[in-house]
Amino acid sequence: MGEYLVEMDRICKSFPGVKALDDVSFRLKSGEVLALLGENGAGKSTLMNVLSGVYQKDEGEIRLFGKTVEDLNPKKAQELGIAIIHQEMNLCRHLSVAENIFLGREESRCGVLQRKDMNRRAAEILARLNLDIDPAEAVGNLAVSKQQMVEIAKALSTDARILIMDEPTSALTMSEIDELFQIIRRLKGDGCGIVYISHRLEELQNIADRVQIMRDGRYIASMNFADTTMDEIIANMVGREITEKFPRISCPRGEKILEVRNLNAGKMVRDINFDLFAGEIVGIAGLLGAGRTETTRAIFGADPKDSGQILLDGREVVIRRPIDAIRGGIMLVPEDRRKDGLCIKLSVQSNISLPNLDMLSNRFGVIDRKKEKKLSEKSIQDLNIKLPSSTVNVATLSGGNQQKVVVAKWLARNSRVVMFDEPTRGIDVAAKVEIYNLMNELKKQGIGVLFVSSEMPEILGISDRILVMCDGKITGEMEIGEASQDLILKYATTFDTKSGLPEAI
Amino acid sequence: METKDRQNAWKRFMSIRGVGQVVTVTAGLIVLCIVFSMLSSSFYSERNVGNLLRQIAPILIIGIGQAYVLITGNIDLSIGSVVGMSCMISATLMTKGVAPFAATMITILICLGVGVLNGTLVAKCKVPPFIATLGTMTIARGVAQIVNNNYNTDAIGDSAQGFRNLFYYGKTLGLYNTIWIAVILFLAFDFLLGKTRTGRHIYAIGSNMEAAKLSGVNSVNTTVIVYVVSAFCACVVGLITCAIAGMGTMDAGNMYEMYAVAAAAIGGISTFGGEGLLVGTVVGASIWGVLQNGLQFAGAPVAIRNIVIGTIVVISVLLDVVIRKNKPRKKAKRVLPVQVGSAK
């Protein structure tokens, strides 16, 4: 191990309402693999985005190769030798491997592309990585793992010495992961520094030299991997005091409302079985991509089901489309409010009334404006949404208030089951508490509440019962009394297909 | 106090979505009318005003149809061909001795079929609307040509005089019937769009298809409805065209789909979907008609008319794009915390 490639000192970065990075320091040496660990939202991606110039730091100092760097932007970072390999691949599927590698830096002579030259140079880089990939092949024709390798080749073609890999193994099979690790070791031998972000802690033993742990936008610890234990790492990752307030009310568990039996829908929803009782809040925990959102969407009828039964109050209901679920009293407050929750060009009132138009119109389909106004104003008041009037465009509201509008849409009618998908993502603490209170209110009314969250404290703070998902399956279920962060994390990483990882070479 | 109240009322009126653009283009329309009346003293003669309104009517009708489709974020290129098809089918039937009423009904049914086909292709089969309606545009024109063996029809004859009066030559309460037809269709479709569930669904799928679906909106049915409305409007214009000439012409309605886009777009219907008021299309169609008529009165050759009108279309949509471009930039900052929250 050699000199420091990256030295970041006391980095701070705020976004409106959120302090994403608070006094974080970071070191990366040449010839080492540093595993950057932390829960969702711990600030890992933000820190790496600062390093690669996507975000500008508010405070602190960045030294690259020993030199202080100011005004880092993505282009400058690339020129300095920083390459980031994203979780979702940024390749043009229809272009060839060589074209992708040299995208934006094409070689041309008198305006004519030097295709042969680029293919030759691409072949050299691929050979250096010991990869058997034809540079002229279209990227879309390659297996996912090979595409990942092309990403790496692209990074190396810029002579990058600092590589950031964000969840590089999430789309790979066992043997492909093995292949990736070999390449990482080779790059390490060439003196590159590699930042490795992964939720799969069991992978670390194969490659990590050092770990740095972050939590809530803060630096927590950094140590040599050899000197630590997995338990210590997990304890550092999750062991925070829960500082947010989680209002909890207790009410007796009532009748069984919802029963999901052997639900299958695509790759991410496999053989799901669970019950939901009146007067309880069930949290679904798991890592990103565990199939939690897909499960709620399949129940709601937003995505087609392959098989399985859904019983509401003991009777089977057939849900083919969202409207079937809505009529039956099953509501879904979706995850991404801009993508799935709101019609951003319409008014607050129109958004709230959209799923409830059947109640607001006569049998000829004519909307009763007075009823509509009454309904939306009542919802706005109930949820304490702050806005000048119900006719303003939803786009003008803050994130928390937008989220409340999404929730309001679904609470205006009588429901039996309400599913929330990441209801508090990206909203401030005060608004979060209001959402929790609302969920408690529903619970008190005897409505079954199901909620998906990636925030551990929230799951532990609000739910009465917890389901844990991993890889499209429910891997654990526990009452709140027996739940702990370690236990949830254990179930959440119970991968059945990729558990046996190759031994370190 | 009173002026303050009035100011507030004005502010509230302007804050209704889409009103701003309508007010702007209406001001433009008034300016055009003033300019043309100065250029030619007979622009405001009773005769010309009647003719002008009668010229505007068909553009308004197809504009309404296209506006419906545009609000859902799609486009209908088959409008012009459906106009031709409607014109040829009705004329052929009437020359073959079918009663005008029956001929009209049969024509409407066939045209609605094109609308159902368009809507199904786009919403159910997920064919991009540009391609789907490009296909039906070509097919419908082919149908227009084949119904009378690739000839324009003969005169539809004396028995169809009532048909011709109903759709074009007759007057009711001092106004040409064509104008009445446009007014009635506008009122009906404005009601459908503004006051009913279907109308709200149309805006919703144009604004955010995924959110609308998750709210229980049947996106396939809604898309079929807008294409059926568009085909119906085109059909009516085809009948009007048949009534004007008293015969069927195979190239009737050529390019009308584009005129329809122009009328809707000038009137503030967003070509990106989800926005716009139908009343804007009235203004858009009027601007189109006034330019055609006024430039003709002012003695401008056809070539100049085309250049002026084309320029106006681009400028009005350009304004829309510029306004849109400036808006999200403000929003972008607000989005950031959301992205941070979802960071892994």
Image (cartoon, coloured by chain):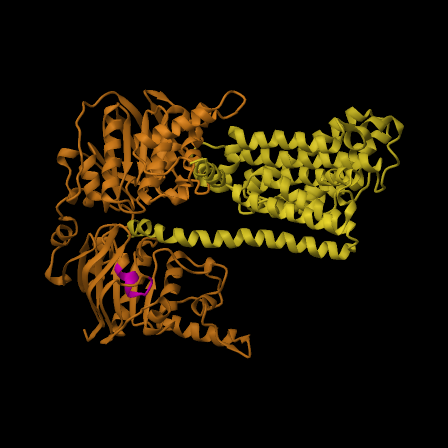
Chain colours: A orange, B yellow
Residue closest to the far front: B1
Quarter of the figure with the C terminus of chain A: bottom left
Residue closest to the far bottom: A110
Q: For residue B244, which quarter of the picture? A: top right
Q: Position of residue B129 (x, y in %)?
A: 59, 45
Q: Residue at x 56, y 36 (%)?
A: B223
Q: Residue at x 43, y 68 (%)?
A: A101
Q: How many numbered circles are shown?
A: 0
Q: Position of residue B241 (x, y in %)?
A: 78, 37
* Residue B263 appears anywhere in the view: yes
Compared across the picture, whether B291 is left or right of A328 comes to: right
Work out whether residue B40 or residue B147 is closer to the camera in this orientation and state it.
B40
Q: Which residues are magenta?
A: A47-54
Q: Position of residue A471 (x, y in %)?
A: 30, 44
Q: Position of residue A213 (x, y in %)?
A: 17, 57
Q: Main secondary structure of the magenta part?
A: helix
* Residue B66 appears anywhere in the view: no
The relative height of residue B327 versus residue A270 in the rendered view (above or below) is below
Work out whether residue A501 or residue B29 is closer to the camera in this orientation and state it.
B29
The relative height of residue A354 versus residue A136 in the rendered view (above or below) is above
Query: Is residue A51 one of those drawn in magenta?
Result: yes
Compared across the picture, whether B272 is left or right of B253 comes to: left
Work out whether residue A199 or residue B151 is closer to the camera in this orientation and state it.
B151
Work out whether residue A134 or residue B80 is closer to the camera in this orientation and state it.
B80
Q: For residue A392, which quarter of the picture? A: top left
Compared across the picture, whether A78 is left or right of A371 comes to: left
Q: Residue at x 28, y 57 (%)?
A: A45
Query: Is residue A146 one of those drawn in magenta?
Result: no
Q: For residue B329, which quarter of the picture? A: bottom left
Quarter of the figure with the N terminus of chain A: bottom left
Q: Residue at x 30, y 61 (%)?
A: A49
